[in-house]
Image (tube, grey):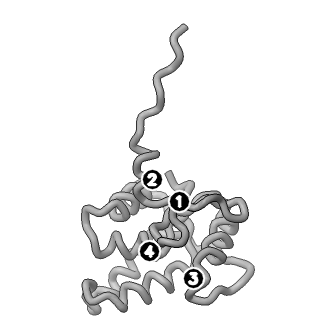
Amino acid sequence: MADILLAPDVFVNASVALGSPPEHVVRRVLGGGKKVKSSEWILARVEAMLGSLDAFKKEALAAQMATIRGLVELVETKKQFGPDAWADALVATAKAAGLKRVVTDHPDLADQTERDGVEFLSSDAWLVEVTTPPPPPPKK
């Protein structure tokens, strides 16, 4: 289940929209007791995004970030990235974590084709994938 990297927007959307596909993804991915991989770049984006949302109480920001930090294992990328370098930062983080898939609802990245060996898929697409039962075995 932890074979994916969660992008900042998935953490943010899950933090503010209970019952949303991102919230279901986060619960499913982080609910297994095993820490998932992330990076300081991802967590910095989450904090900045939550801090700028009127829908998220400012006094809850530190506690929410502490909760998220407690559920992830940080990996380091070889390069530093600016706040707008989503694709490059997510690809670098996925590679540093040994992952080939990123779940994001970022309009420029979700469900696009593979980028440098890393696949981007939306939270909706990932949920469909993990909740669809496998096909029945072929009849003999």
Q: Is residue 116 left or right of residue 82?
A: right
- Identify the mark at residue 125; answer none if there is no mark: 2
The numbered mark, 3 or 4, whose residue comes first in the sequence reads 4
**Mark 3 residue type:** Trp
Quadrant where the C terminus lies? top right
Q: Please tell me whether mark 1 or mark 4 is closer to you in this view.
A: 1
Q: Is residue 139 left or right of residue 114?
A: left
Farthest-out residue, top: 140
Compared with 57, 122 (above or below) is above
The numbered mark, 1 or 4, whose residue comes first in the sequence reads 4
SS under mark 1: loop
**Mark 4 residue type:** Asp
The answer for how far apart the CA atoms under marks 1 and 3 are is: 21 Å
The answer for how far apart the CA atoms under marks 4 and 2 are is: 15 Å
Q: Please tell me whether mark 3 or mark 2 is closer to you in this view.
A: 2
Residue depicted at 50% across the width and 81% down the height: 43
Q: Residue 34 in the image: x percent, y percent? A: 48, 58
Q: Can you identify the residue that label 4 sits on?
A: 9
The answer for how far apart the CA atoms under marks 1 and 2 are is: 8 Å
**Mark 2 residue type:** Ala
SS under mark 4: helix
Q: How many C-alpha atoms fall within 10 Å of the one at disc 3: few (<14), some, or many (≥20)?
A: many
